């Protein structure tokens, strides 16, 4: 057998093996994905899926693709409605997209779950400042200060007071 014939036979065998693996992979179903699509997940599967989705969404947001990140955070929230991380990610993404009403709703949903959640209080205050509602911002920033002092809170408070014309408080 010539060297060329041997290489050709080995190439065909390797190609056939790869094709078989790809075919088997395509035919095999992912039980986790199937169960999620059908809405029949147990708690462990759901937590694993949501955890993976949150990692992907965070990485996606970090690259600047906040629209895609928002969609992933929304799906994670749909699977686990009480997941604060999913809601915060969704709220931040919506705020970055300028979807202020939806961002406010998402931040409020976080506060419904955890009324003293610092990131939600700051985020909601930031939206209120952006939409020229400084009084609402001040209320949330003062609640945030009760959780601990933070220069960002004081800066936002100064801005909100300044927007109201209360330069002394600013």
Image (cartoon, grey):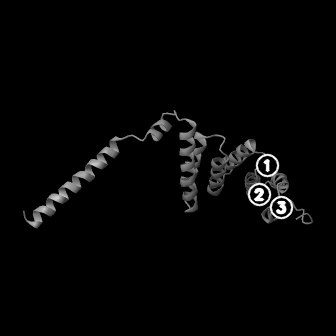
Q: Earlier in the sequence, mark 1 or mark 2?
A: 1
**Percent coordinates x, y for residue 106 in the rendering:** 68, 46
Kindly report the distance in space between the C-alpha atoms of the residues bearing marks 3 and 2: 19 Å
- Pointer 1 local density, CA inside 10 Å: few below 14, some 14–19, many at least 20: some
9 horizontally vs 85: left or right? left
- Pointer 2 local density, CA inside 10 Å: few below 14, some 14–19, many at least 20: many
Q: Which residue is mark 1?
A: 116
Q: Which residue is mark 3?
A: 149
Farthest right residue?
168
**Percent coordinates x, y for residue 42 in the rendering:** 55, 35
**Percent coordinates x, y for residue 64 in the rendering:** 56, 62
Q: Is residue 158 above or below residue 51?
A: below
Farthest left residue?
1
In the figure, residue 157 lies in which quadrant? bottom right
C-beta proximity under 8 Å, tags 3 and 2: no
Q: Residue at x 14, y 58 (%)?
A: 9
Q: Is residue 14 above or below residue 81?
A: below
C-beta proximity under 8 Å, tags 3 and 1: no
Quarter of the image with the N terminus in it: bottom left
The residue tagged with tag 3: helix, strand or loop? Answer: loop
| Nearer-the-camera pick, 69 or 137 | 69
Q: Is residue 87 above or below residue 126?
A: above
Q: Which residue is mark 2?
A: 129
């Amino acid at each position: 057998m010539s060297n060329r014939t041997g290489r050709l036979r080995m190439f065909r065998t390797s190609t056939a093996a790869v094709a078989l693996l790809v075919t088997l992979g395509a035919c095999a179903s992912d039980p986790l994905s199937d169960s999620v699509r059908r809405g029949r997940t147990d708690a462990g599967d759901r937590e694993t899926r949501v955890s993976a989705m949150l990692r992907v969404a965070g990485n996606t947001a970090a690259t600047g693709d906040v629209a895609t990140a928002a969609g992933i955070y929304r799906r994670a929230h749909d699977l686990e409605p009480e997941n604060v991380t999913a809601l915060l990610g969704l709220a931040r993404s919506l705020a970055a997209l300028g979807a202020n009403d939806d961002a406010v709703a998402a931040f409020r949903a976080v506060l419904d779950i955890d009324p003293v959640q610092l990131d939600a209080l700051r985020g909601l205050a930031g939206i209120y400042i952006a939409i020229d509602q400084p009084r609402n911002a001040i209320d949330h920033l003062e609640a945030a200060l009760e959780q601990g002092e933070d220069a960002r809170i004081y800066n936002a408070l100064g801005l909100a007071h300044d927007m109201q014309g209360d330069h002394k408080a600013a």
